[in-house]
Image (cartoon, helix red, strand yellow):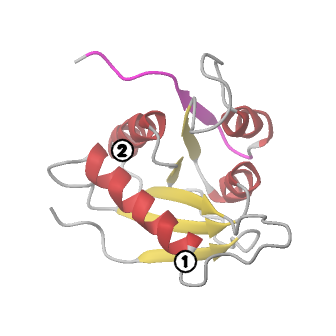
Amino acid sequence: MALPVGFRNIDSGTMTDSSKHHIIVGVDGSDSSIEALREAAEIAEALDVPLEATTAWEFPVMGEYTPIRDWSPEEDAKKILSSAVSRAFPDAPPSDLELTTVRGPAARTLIEVSKDARMLVLGSRGHGGFVGMLLGSVSAACAEHAHCPVLVVHRPRPA
């Protein structure tokens, strides 16, 4: 399977394109975000607009400890994003799918990139928090503060 070529790396807060002609989907590798990616692709296709899958990453806070020398959280984010695309689209990804990694906390980063989006699509639950909550902290923050409409995908569609 051929994955989209290349990644776009963005420092949080530097978005400048105000075209608002694309849909952004937040991806963290969770099952919920995989379903959000599928849903966003269908919407983007129906509206004939590009789709951007975005993963936020940060250097972990480790107090006085030094992070592992040869480890890159940005490279991990790229791997998570590529794996999510492979899981969501086992045959072939959408042709206009762009993969983006952004440095910063997930909620703040997605809210910032939503300034330039037609719609933001998120899974209802990521990897953290308490199982059983209707919304995770990232989806809740984005639903409240995003600069565009937000779709929160709660569960897989029946087969």
Q: Provide residue 55's location: percent of width, then percent of height.
A: 55, 58
Residue depicted at x 34% and y 38%: 42
Quadrant of the image occupied by residue 11: bottom right
Q: Provide residue 147's location: percent of width, then percent of height.
A: 74, 47
Q: Is residue 84 left or right of residue 68?
A: left
Residue type pointed to by label 2: Ala
Residue depicted at x 79% and y 34%: 144
Instruction: Tell which residue pokes out farthest to the bottom in this image.
Output: 69
Q: Which residue is mark 2?
A: 41
Q: Quadrant of the C terminus?
A: top left
Q: Which residue is mark 1?
A: 71
Q: Main secondary structure of the magenta part?
A: loop
Residue type pointed to by label 1: Trp
| Mark 2 and mark 1: Cα distance apart in space | 31 Å
Residue depicted at x 57% and y 37%: 126
Circle 1 — which element? loop
Give the camera-side residue of 124 and 48.
124
Mark 1: give few (<14), some (14-19) or many (20+) Cα within 10 Å. Answer: few
Q: Provide residue 105's location: percent of width, then percent of height.
A: 73, 57
Q: Nearer the viewer, mark 2 or mark 1?
A: 1
Please tell me whether residue 57 is drawn above or below residue 128 in the rendered image.
below
Residues rendered magenta in the picture: 147-158
